[in-house]
Amino acid sequence: MEKNIVLIKGDGIGPEIVDEALKVLDKVCEKYGHTFRYTRILMGGESIDEYGVPLTDEALDTAKAADAVLLGSVGGPKWDDLPGHLRPEKGLLAIRKGLGLFANVRPAYLYPELKAACPLRDEIIGDGFDMVVMRELTGGLYFGARETVEQDGQMVAKDTLTYSEEEIRRIAVKGFDIARKRRNKVISVDKANVLDSSRLWRKVVHEVAASYPDVECVDMLVDNCAMQLVKDPKQFDVILTENMFGDILSDEASMVTGSIGMLSSASLNETKFGLYEPSHGSAPDIAGMDLANPIATILSAAMMLRYSFDLDQEADAIENAVKQVLADGYRTGDIMSDGCKQVGCKEMGDLIAERV
Ligand code: NAI
Ligand code: MG
């Protein structure tokens, strides 16, 4: 198989972790006979330094023409004093919007070897948990009409939460499709006891569910979901939810695994295209020191193979290589515990590539 991948190494630890993901992808190409061609574009701080803006139109067009984008992370203290529209994170929003990436997929998986890092009690963890948050990314409160006005001598601010049936339907379809590749259960999270937009959400999700008789569909109110995530995380397979609920719940779901350097993500649109990136930021405090954990980025590359290229076997090979390295006792500093062998970013990449 031949694919064109756009690489955004980004700032801070970005270049280090992307290089390790490339090492692993090279190994996959060698073993399974694929050819991946890479084009580098600049985004975030690097782009600001070079072109004065966080993302150029040309870079966006290059990304649009690719089969997928693999991203490290952007931002850092060097650019903190810039005005809002020129900050590195604006590049991220611009590329998500420019590519129509309405579905954000964030797995939260607790590796049995990393149980010690999990903040939950043993009896709650049991034999571990494995869930995915499917968050709507281009609608809802973050994109609705907003205004701040003076009224009766005080300031009044307003944000609106808007969803159309079509916006709900397309994310629901993504959620059910992913559930079919997993354990066939969708928990759809809303606030239908209060919000009109949630009542529409629930209605459309039920319509979509009717086309997936093999997938169980359960409704859950968002406040209850926040509680259930720490009370009984094992009940979740796919959490399907709107933008702001998903922002909050995906952070909660990921942190119950206790390890920021392990968590991958994908942002998808209606096509096979996707943007893949670790859930963490550019970790400026450890940049350039060979201390970063590259696993989140390596697992994001595995998601790219699974979701954009339909290479399930190759994605499994990467995920199993990660499990094997952890079972063999190798850890980067962020997931280090007693009795394990501490390795740097590069060595972690080597060890995973070897096991592919
Ligand atoms: P961060 O995720 O970069 O770092 C938080 C803490 O986790 C730090 O102590 C860091 O050393 C550690 N950490 C993060 N990733 C790690 C890894 N792979 N291995 C080992 N340790 C790791 O979040 P922070 O400090 O809030 O933000 C730093 C910069 O990153 C900011 O400029 C922020 O805007 C940007 N950022 C970018 C994101 C992106 O590109 N998608 C997402 C979140 C933040
Ligand atoms: Mg967030």
Image (cartoon, helix red, strand yellow):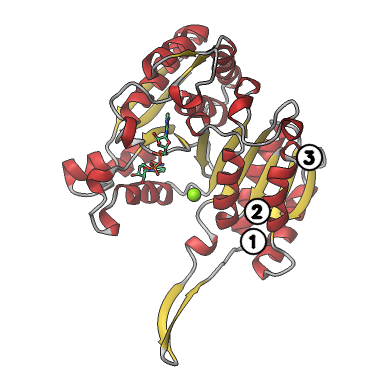
Does label 2 or label 3 sit earlier along the sequence? 2
277 vs 193: above or below: above
Quadrant of residue 289 within the rendered picture: top left
The answer to whether residue 273 of the structure is visible from this angle is yes
Quick check: marks 3 and 1 in contact, CB under 8 Å?
no
Q: Mark 3 or 1, which is nearer the eye?
A: 3
Quick check: marks 1 and 2 in contact, CB under 8 Å?
yes
Q: CA distance from mark 2 to mark 3?
A: 16 Å
User: Residue 25, how many percent across, how many down?
Assistant: 44, 17
> Quick one: which residue is furthest to the front in this view?
338
Q: How busy is the neighbourhood of tag 1: few (under 14 within 10 Å), some, or many (20 plus)? A: few
User: Residue 185, how many percent across, how many down?
Assistant: 76, 39
User: Residue 6, how many percent across, how many down?
Assistant: 36, 31
In the image, what residue occupies the spot 53% across and 20% down? 337
Question: Dot 1 corresponds to which residue?
Answer: 165
Ligand 1 quadrant assignment: top left
Kindly identify the amino acid type of the residue bearing the numbered disc 2. Arg
Question: Dot 3 corresponds to which residue?
Answer: 215
In the image, what residue occupies the spot 30% across and 30% down? 287
Badge 2 element? helix
User: Residue 329, how many percent across, how many down?
Assistant: 55, 12
Badge 3 element? loop
Badge 1 element? helix
Q: Mark 2 or 3, which is nearer the eye?
A: 3
101 vs 143: above or below: above
The answer to whether residue 66 of the structure is visible from this angle is no
Q: Nearer the viewer, residue 307 or 90?
A: 90
Q: CA distance from mark 1 to mark 2?
A: 6 Å
Q: CA distance from mark 3 to mark 1?
A: 21 Å
